[in-house]
Structures are given as structure tokens and as C-alpha cells.
Image (spheres, rainbow, N blue to C red):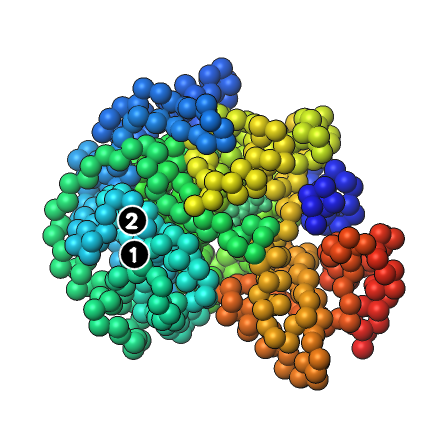
Amino acid sequence: MSPHESGPAAGQANHPGDALENLSHEDRRFPPSPEFAAQAVATAEDYAEAAADRPAFWARQARELLTWSKDFTQTLDWSNPPFASWFGDGQLNAAYNALDRHVENGLGDRVAIHFEGEPGDTRSYTYAELTREVKKAANAFESLGIRKGDRVAVYLPMIPEAVITLLACARIGAVHSVVFGGFSADALRSRIDDAEAKLVVTSDGTYRRGKPSALKPAVDEALAKEGHNVGSVIVVKRNGEPVEWTEGRDLWWDDTVGTASPEHTAVGHDAEHPLFILYTSGTTGKPKGILHTTGGFLTQAAYTHKAVFDLHPESDVFWCTADVGWVTGHTYVAYAPLINGATQLMYEGTPDSPHQGRWWELIEKYKVSILYTAPTAIRTFMKWGREIPAKYDLGSLRVLGSVGEPINPEAWMWYREVIGGNGGKRQDRTPIVDTWWQTETGAHMIAPLPGVTEAKPGSAQVPLPGIAVDVVDELGESVPNGSGGYLVIREPWPAMLRGIWGDPDRYRDTYWSRFDNMYFAGDGAKKDEDGDVWLLGRVDDVMNVSGHRLSTTEIESALVSHPSVAEAAVVGAADETTGQAVVAFVILRGSAAEDADIVTTLRNHVGKEIGPIAKPKNILVVPELPKTRSGKIMRRLLKDVAEGRDAGDATTLADNTVMTQIAASLRK
Ligand code: WT7
């Protein structure tokens, strides 16, 4: 389905945004309290300053928030779009900025990370301690032959070693490529191959809902077949479960990092030196390796973390609940909080282990003041009931963040009243910041500024200072207030992706060819009467399940790779809790329909090909798929079926009886 076919400008009735808007309407506005505004980091002047001279605004942030080993003379080089260079002749070291300089500035005893494991074990690292660990890891990686520019694959749970590994890579100029632990061995292997990684850092496993859960077997399986460049696998002992061992390749973290020297001098790397690759789903079957570089990424990460969360590093305790396997866990766990010298909480497990109040218990225990999470989590807590958070003292909270998908107004209000309002124990007073951004944008792009912006429940509202966002129509013309269209970014921004690893053409085609000289985000959006931006969900073949990005095409490819499947079509159907859910329609081959377990078999097959997170919630066996005369599957009609509606306009179908056939087969 092309954006043309499915875009909001085309007036399609089943766009995800429509479901969102139908859910509720909330006209209340929440201006910042005078007390909050008086102490706020962000000011309204930031907008004016950035509007007057965008590069100068970012240059000021770069110099104020980061320490450069060599200052830059040129802020932005956009002479060869869409390839940008920010702070091009400057040099800096990301790990030095996150660690050493804070120790040198007398903050060595400040806690950098409070870690709480799912079973309840705890560890805290001061900045001095974390610096020492990162230096040891940097030495260990170097002793294994990892050099500047080499790629390191990271397949770890949410444990401090994940952050230590990322920063150790950054320190020596190695490029980390984190693969989320919920991805399968096959998915891990394809990412290892694409990046030509030389080292894998993993763990025996982790804990999930009170039970040990394994990771190392997936690494073993991924590396079983020859043809990769991985020479070493470092294994963190986390759950103590027995693991297979390949002599000469596998090394325990404690035996390598644990015994390495804690002395290591950080040298500056070029501002445009690659910092990391992170794979994300696109509209085709093959995930894209999104490339981020050092100076611009860190500048925008640090600025947004400070301004959007109103960070006061000397007193705040920041908790971003995202896994380090996603971009949110890169920017707002591994980098920004440490660059800004903040104290953060890191939690390994699920919100319902051992009980449904675990998060609130953690907030009370660590006096978390800034919470950053996803709407899907908030909706889950709503379902569990407000009496659960009400049992805890949430009085330390003062800013609440949301990310990953549009937040529906009810969830927004619940978040503000029940969580921000400390279970109703006080008047709600906690600003909510709904932050729109993407793996590709590297850091926040659209968000209210707490203390400045009057908040509207359900809207990310305004582009940040120094960010040029617009909503345009099919032809790329800016739409007037009150209208919808496609979200674009008109000017380069510091944390923008620098490309797709190894595929410059795909970078240009995917993001810069839909509209001239504009970055096309893949999202639909509208401007309200005030010109504030409301995000309406993806307009391409990308689904958003619990804030995780999944590609319909990738799951379809996984399904048809099974011998029993002749054809498959996947849609993201509206789901009350997860935002969208994966629903697959399959046509089976030959006798496969007689196999009573076929649906389970296919779900597991997708789990093996991509990962458990991609398993369809429903698989519907159908006799036909609705196709246009040119052979394109009309997912829009399938979405109607998946969401329990009568199928919409089917007049462009090659065979107009198909929808009746599907309906009849599903009734059976
Ligand atoms: C897509 C990017 C950015 C970190 C997490 C996801 C959707 C993200 C919002 C928001 C509405 C949002 C968009 C975007 N999205 N944040 N606040 N409101 N939609 O990163 O996996 O790269 O996915 O997530 O559709 O394009 P990602």
C-alpha cells in the first residue's frame, strides 16, 4: 500500500488516528503552574533564539552541554543533502562526556545508576565506579582486538553491563549495534552479518516474571553457521543457568572485563565518527541499520533530556522504562542522563513481577522524580486499576513523559491524575510531556516544554526549539491549521540519522524522495486550530505494537517462508492495550488446513524468524486475499475485518466476491 493510498489526506476511514480520535475528546487545557514555571529549565526564549539562527542555537547547546577535546569551527554542512555533517571538524569522546568529566568536576560520588533486578537484587554505581567499569571494559574490548570503527553486537537484558558495554564501545570508537533480547537467533544473525560485527556481548540470560530466561542459546544458534566475523563472545553471568560453551570464542565478562586494568585514557573522536547502528523495521522485509554519529546525537540527546524533562541533575532521579534494545534506551538510558550528570534508575523486569505494584514500589523506594514510559504501559495500569498505584507514595514524581505511540486523552488524564496526582492524594500538578520522535531522529523532536507550554491531553504539540516540523499535503504543500496530512521535517537536525548502514540509496529513497528537500517521517499528523501537532499513527506498512515498531512486510515474509503458507497479508488492528495488534490472514497450501495446530505452528514460526514480539495475536485462515487489479493486497479491507467492522469500499477489487468469501470462511 503506498502512502498515497493510505494517507490521512486521502480521507481513509480506518486510519489509526480515527480510532484514536473516536476514543474520547478532552478540551481541558493545563497551563504550567507558576511554581513549576519559576524553576523550569526551559524558557520561551529558546524558541525565539532558535528561530533567529538555528545552527547558532545548536552550536551553543553543543558547547554548553558537552566537553570537546577540539572545538568545531563549522556548525552545519548541508552542502550535500541529505547527507549532513554537524560540528564536522570538532572532536569529543562520548564516554568522557558521560563519565570522566563528572568525576573530574567533583561529582564522582553521585549515583549514576541505581539498578534493581527483577528478583530484587540491587546494585548502585557512582559516577566514579561506573567510570572505572567502563575503562575496564574498554581495555578488555581492546585486548580482544576491537579497534576504532569495528562493530560490536550487543544482546543483553536491562542490566548495568548493557550501559557499560555501550559506553566502552563509544570510548574506543567502536560502533555498537544493540539487538533487542526479544529478537530471535535468525534476526540476531542477520544483524550481525549486516554490520559485520567482530564481537558479541551477551549474558547467560535474565529474569522474566520470576523465572530465568535464556539469551546465550540464541547467540550460539546465530553463530553456528560459518561465514560471520565474530571472533569473541563475552558473556555476563546474570541468572547462573548452565550455558553451552565454545572454547576459544566464549569468555566470561568477569574473566575479561573483571580482570582488565581500570586505567584508560579517552581520546577525542571526530564529531561525525559513527557512534551506533540500530536496526529498525521499515516498509520492506529487510530491517534498516540506522546510523548515528557522535557530536550531533549527543548534543540533541543532552539538550532534550534537560529541557523536555526539566532535569535538575543535582536532585532529580530519572527513570526511563525503555529497554536498551530500542532507541529510547539508547538516547535516554545509556547516553543523555549520564551526559547530563543525572541519577537514574534501571529496572530489569516486567511491571507485574512479583506483583502489579512493582513500578510504584520502585518509584517510592528510589524517590523517582521523572518517569518516562509508553502509553501501552499506562493503559495496562489503567486496566489493573487505580487502587494499585494508590498503595504507594508517588509524591516524588514531578514530570511524566510518554513515548512510542499516540497517547489517547483518557490515558493522558489517568497518567496525570492517578500517577502525577499521587493516587488522588494531592491535586494533580505534574506536567506530562508527550514526546514524538523516531529511531531515525535520534532524540525528541516534538514535545511540550514543561513550565512553558500549556498542555493539551493527547497531543505532542510543538516542535522543539531548533527543529523544523511541518504537516504537508500530497504535493508537499504546508497544510493550514485545522487540516491533516503527512509529518515532515524541513531542516536538518543534529541527531538526525546519517544514513542506513551500507545503503546510501535506500536512505535517500526511504526518507528524502517522497517530498522534495523534506524528511518524510512515515507518520500522519494534523495541525489543530492553534497550529499544534497531533500525531495520527503510521501511514506506511509499519505497525506499532506496544510502542514497538514492526513491519507488516517482514511478518508476511516470515509467514510465507513456512511451507504450509501460500500467501499472507498482515495488518495492525486497533487494540485497546497495545495500540495495535498483529493480525495475519493466510492462505494455506494443500492439506495444511487439516492440521489442527497450524495456527500455533505459524505463530511459533514467526517467533523463530523474527522474535516473540512479532508473533501475530490472531491468524485467520482465509480462501482468498482482497487484491486490486494490479495485484496489490488491499490491507485496508482486511483491517476492517480484523477490527470487526463491515469492510469498506471494495469496488476496486479484482474479484469483488472475495470479501464475502472471507467473511463466510471466518464465520465457520
Ligand atoms: C514511530 C517511531 C521514539 C522512540 C520509540 C519509538 C511512533 C513515537 C510517538 C508519540 C505518536 C509516536 C511514530 C513514529 N511514535 N512516539 N509521542 N506520538 N506517535 O521509536 O521504533 O523508531 O518508532 O513511533 O509512529 O514514527 P521507533
Q: Position of residue 191 (x, y in %)?
A: 42, 57
Q: Up-down: is 58 above or below 212?
A: above
Q: Residue at x 77, y 45 (%)?
A: 12
Q: State the mark number for residue 150.
A: 2
Q: Which of the four quarters of the rendered structure image does ligand 1 lie in?
A: top right
Which image quarter: residue 91?
top left
Circles 2 and 1, Cβ within 8 Å, touching? The answer is: yes
Is the residue at mark 2 in contact range of ligand 1, meaning its CB lies under 8 Å from it?
no
Q: State the mark number for residue 608.
A: none
Q: Earlier in the sequence, mark 2 or mark 1?
A: 2
Quadrant containing the C terminus in the rendered view = bottom right
Asked if residue 544 lies left or right of residue 330, the reply is: right
Q: Position of residue 239 (x, y in %)?
A: 31, 71
Outermost residue toward the top? 52
Q: Is residue 49 visible?
A: yes
Question: Which is more toward the observer, 226 or 293?
Answer: 226
Q: At label 2, which amino acid type do we have?
A: Asp
In the structure shown, which secondary structural element does the residue marked by tag 1 occupy?
A: loop
Q: Residue at x 84, y 69 (%)?
A: 661
How far is the residue under mark 2 from the one under mark 1?
Answer: 7 Å
Check disc 1 and report the residue beneath it. Answer: 198
Asked if residue 553 lies left or right of residue 169, the reply is: right
In the structure shown, which secondary structural element does the residue marked by tag 2 occupy?
A: loop
Q: Position of residue 608 (x, y in %)?
A: 50, 70
Q: Is residue 416 visible?
A: no
Q: Residues within 10 Å of mark 2 (few under 14, many from 20)?
A: some
Q: Residue at x 22, y 72 (%)?
A: 247
Q: At label 1, which amino acid type do we have?
A: Lys
Q: Position of residue 48 (x, y in %)?
A: 50, 17
